[in-house]
Amino acid sequence: MSSQVMMADHAFLIHTPEEAVQHLNEWSGQEMTAESLRGTRARLTDTSRQEAKRRCLLEILGRPDPIWNPAQHPELDAEGGAAAWVKRIRREAERASVKRTQTRHRE
């Protein structure tokens, strides 16, 4: 038996300082009015998502250990380096594509 978790939208009232409203208007190029409230909500949601992503990336970049570990990618250290690896992968993909196309034409 599987269970599903549904995320509900949450509605809440936020008292926004006038300065913040002015910034939102400047960034969006629109005046915040009752008619544009739906767009304002969307902009606020988008802005909060972007900020969360930005903070996550900053946290990752602030870690002392590097993100990329060459030891985990020996295929790039092989003869020819990364350029040779990319060429080989592209060649394999092209062969697979040609093979699929030929199979379709036979049917």
Image: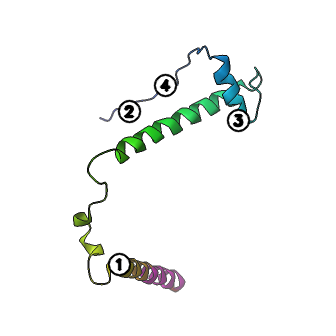
Residue 103 inside the magenta-drawn segment: yes
Mark 2: few, some, or many residues within 10 Å (few <14, many ≥20)?
few
Which residue is identified by label 1?
85
Magenta residues, start to end:
94-105
Residue type for callout 1: Trp
Q: Quadrant of residue 56?
A: top left
Q: Earlier in the sequence, mark 2 or mark 3?
A: 2
Q: x%, y% of residue 51?
A: 50, 36
Q: Give how far across and how far down residue 74 sits, in percent.
A: 24, 71
- In the rendered image, residue 54, in percent from the top left (x then y), is placed at 47, 41
Residue 28 circle label: 3
Q: Which residue is mark 2?
A: 4
Compared to residue 94, the image places residue 5 above or below, namely above
From the image, state whether disc 3 or disc 4 is nearer to you: 3
Disc 1 crowd rating (10 Å Cα; few below 14, some 14-19, many 20+) is some
Q: Are marks 1 and 4 in contact (CB under 8 Å)?
A: no
Mark drawn on residue 50: none
Q: What separation in Å lies between label 2 and label 4 (alpha carbons)?
A: 12 Å
Q: Tell me if mark 3 has few (under 14), some (14-19) or many (20+) residues whose alpha carbon lies within 10 angstroms of its own.
A: few
Q: Helix, strand, or loop for circle 2?
A: loop
Say whether marks 1 and 2 touch (CB < 8 Å): no
Q: Nearer the viewer, mark 2 or mark 3?
A: 3
Mark 1 or mark 4, earlier in chain: 4
The disc, 3 or 4, on the residue closer to the chain's N-terminal end is: 4
Q: Nearer the viewer, mark 2 or mark 4?
A: 4
Point 30% across, 45% down: residue = 63
- Does 92 lie within the magenta span? no
